Image (cartoon, rainbow, N blue to C red):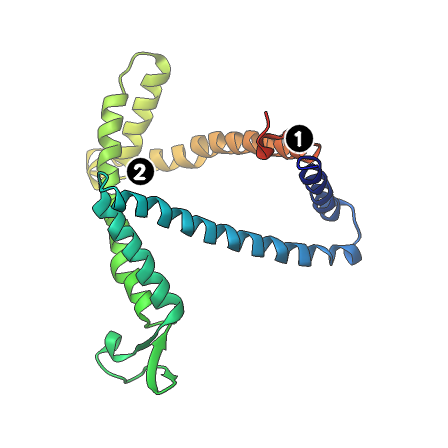
Amino acid sequence: MRREIPLFLTFLFGTFFVATFFFVPDRIKIFTEPVNDWLSIIISFTYVLGFGNVVRIHSAKIAGRQPGWGYSIATLAGVAVMILYGMLLWIPANVMHGGAGGAQKGPGGSWTTGMQPGSVFNWLYDAVYTPMQSTMFGLLAFFISSAAFRAFRVRSFQAALLAVTALLLILGGVPLGDKVWSGFGPLTAWTMGILQNAGKRAILIGAALGAVSTGVKIILGIEKSYLGGQ
């Protein structure tokens, strides 16, 4: 029964949602709303489990003084600060604005709280997280360029085509390319709009067909890997 019940529930709910989307009248579709609410609750619990897993892994690294344990301290401290400022604390507005002018009114005076505009949570997100994210992606561009330079070794026609296309896109995306030849920009736009879109859509169609086939196999009980089977 430990396997039969999950298989039965998977078949029941999978078939139900497919039927309500394609065949069942609208008056029966109202039953999908409570089920969607259940799904949201289940997803919320997965976030809690994910948070617990992050705390467990990084706590073990800190306790064992494993390599990089200092980053684990920064991670846990960041998580704790964002949770506290986002959910639990009322923050005086003058922390953010240097005064109470224009702040939202709350218990005991002028306050900003939680995730509202002007709160410490939003300030940390905009002034700390967003610049760090931009820095990471800026550095990532150099790493990708370095890896591409090492990887683009022309040993076949496909590799040569990839190298030439990458070079054209790079030149078409920087001001230097336009100075060398004004046609790099339109050529890059045509490549991205026609060739790239055609290949991407073919990949997405194939991925969608694969997802549909996997979903049907799961609903029918053919695919049981989510139960720990083969």
In this view, 185 is above or below 54? above
In the rendered image, the quadrant that contains the C terminus is top right
| Residue 114 shows up from this direction | no
In this view, 110 is above or below 158? below
User: Which of 79/208 is in front?
Assistant: 79
User: Which of 165/96 is in front?
Assistant: 96
Q: Is residue 165 left or right of residue 24?
A: left
In this view, 61 is above or below 30? above
Q: Which x, y percent locates residue 104?
A: 36, 82
Q: Amino acid at mark 1?
A: Lys
Residue ID for mark 2: 185
Q: Amino acid at mark 2?
A: Gly
In the rendered image, the quadrant that contains the N terminus is top right
**Residue density around tag 2, few if under 14, some if 14–19, many if 20 or more, within 10 Å:** many
* The label number, if any, that marks residue 217 in the structure image: 1
Task: Looking at the image, tell me whether mark 1 or mark 2 is earlier in sequence order.
Answer: 2
Q: Residue at x 73, y 43 (%)?
A: 12
